[in-house]
Image (cartoon, grey):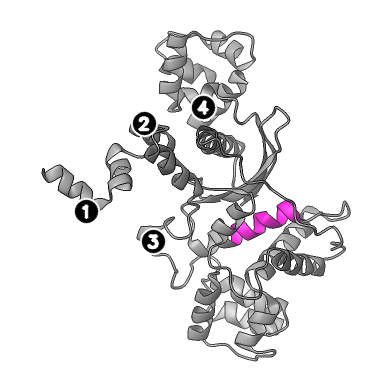
Amino acid sequence: MFGERLKLARKKAGFSLDKLAETLGGAVTKQALSKYERGLMMPGSKVLTELAKALDVSLDYLLSEEVLNLEGIDFRKQVRTTAKEHARVEAAVIDQLERYLTVEEILELESAEWHPPGLEHVRLEDIEGAEAAANELRDEWGLGDDPIPNISELLEEHGIKVLMLELPNSVSGLTCLVDRGDSKAKLPAIVVNKHHSLERRRLTLAHELAHRVLVIPPSFRDQEEETAAYRFAGAFLMRADHLRQEVGKRRARLGYREIIDLKRMYRVSAAALVVRLEQIGTIERATLSTLFQTVGRTWRSLEPEEIEPVEKRGEFERPKRFERLSYRALAEGYISPAKAMELLNKPLSEIEEGMRGPEQLDTHRRQ
């Protein structure tokens, strides 16, 4: 277990074995590092401390066994994503999940149990089946027809760990199962990129949810699976009946301001909105093409009138359960401010403000 963690941390830092040995000032040879990673040797406490410092990870990360493995990692990515970026992302995800599960253990909380939705009778024989599955899940979760106000909170309520991390721009997100060993139930996790817009993050969450709940037939090619996941995501975020009530059953033309108001209502991208309108038959394919050639010619790469200002990127609809539990553990005296700093990866000033509030903290400092 330690060897696997060490190897992941090294890849996250972008180090080769030679580079890590050099960074350690020759205190550990490349051969010894290789044996550590292969589980043939275990370093002493001094070397462990130096390894953690050189790789910018905690000792808890290197030694903990809360997360044994991430299974079935499914990246939502662009073709430019490299194997090195994959390794760095996997290490960052394990690191954050370790923190999350540590807080739950401190508070003696069981992770919210994941109950896979009962969609067995929805057969995904074609892309239309993804639409039916999205409707079925909305009904099972009692969501009605209205837009979903906060999909991060929704998924965590249903037992999915949601993480928002600083990922390479080429990585939109991923989904995986967390293997905790000891016959514990595996936990689903979905990760999104903090640097991406709110509209894009919401679509990624719904898209990765699709990969968690859809049973893909063996006959589906990779591209067909992705198309089904996108169809599910659009239907989950914008239920067809509700959208038709707002826009109409048939439209030959749409104006810019109407599109912006609608995308803000559903909290989706302008591009996803107009594609969805074509999917449900409200506009023709020719109308969709015209939109992307005229008013929406930049929408696939540049979101118009983003809901979340760029300077506040990552603050809207962020997953909050882990942070909430960390402050609970601090308030109840289960952890120290130093431990809270480590778990939340925040400076002491932010931890103190999180406990006292900004006004009380200013008063305390003036005294």
Residue type at mark 4: give it.
Tyr
Residue type at mark 2: give it.
Ser
Tell me which residue sits at (54%, 79%) in the image. 262
Pointers 2 and 3 in contact (CB under 8 A)? no
- Residue 336 tag number: 2
Q: SS at mark 3?
A: helix
Prevailing secondary structure of the magenta residues: helix
Tell me which residue sits at (39%, 38%) in the image. 330
Q: Is residue 345 visible?
A: no
- Which residue is tagged 1? 359
- Which residue is tagged 3? 310
Q: Nearer the viewer, residue 64 or 54?
A: 64
Label 1 crowd (10 A; few <14 / some 14-19 / many >=20): few
Q: Earlier in the sequence, mark 2 or mark 1?
A: 2
Q: SS at mark 1?
A: helix
Question: x and y percent of residue 25 in the render?
Answer: 39, 12
Pointers 1 and 3 in contact (CB under 8 A)? no
Question: x and y percent of residue 73 in the render?
Answer: 68, 42
Q: SS at mark 2?
A: loop
Task: Give the magenta-colored segment's residue range.
Answer: 203-213
- Which residue is tagged 4? 61
CA gap between label 3 and label 4 equals 32 Å
Label 2 crowd (10 A; few <14 / some 14-19 / many >=20): few
Q: Earlier in the sequence, mark 1 or mark 4?
A: 4
Q: Disc 2 or disc 3, which is closer to the eye?
A: 2
Tell me which residue sits at (51%, 50%) in the image. 169
Pointers 3 and 4 in contact (CB under 8 A)? no
Tell me which residue sits at (66%, 58%) in the image. 207
Q: Is residue 22 visible?
A: yes
CA gap between label 1 and label 4 equals 35 Å
Q: Nearer the viewer, residue 113 or 21?
A: 113
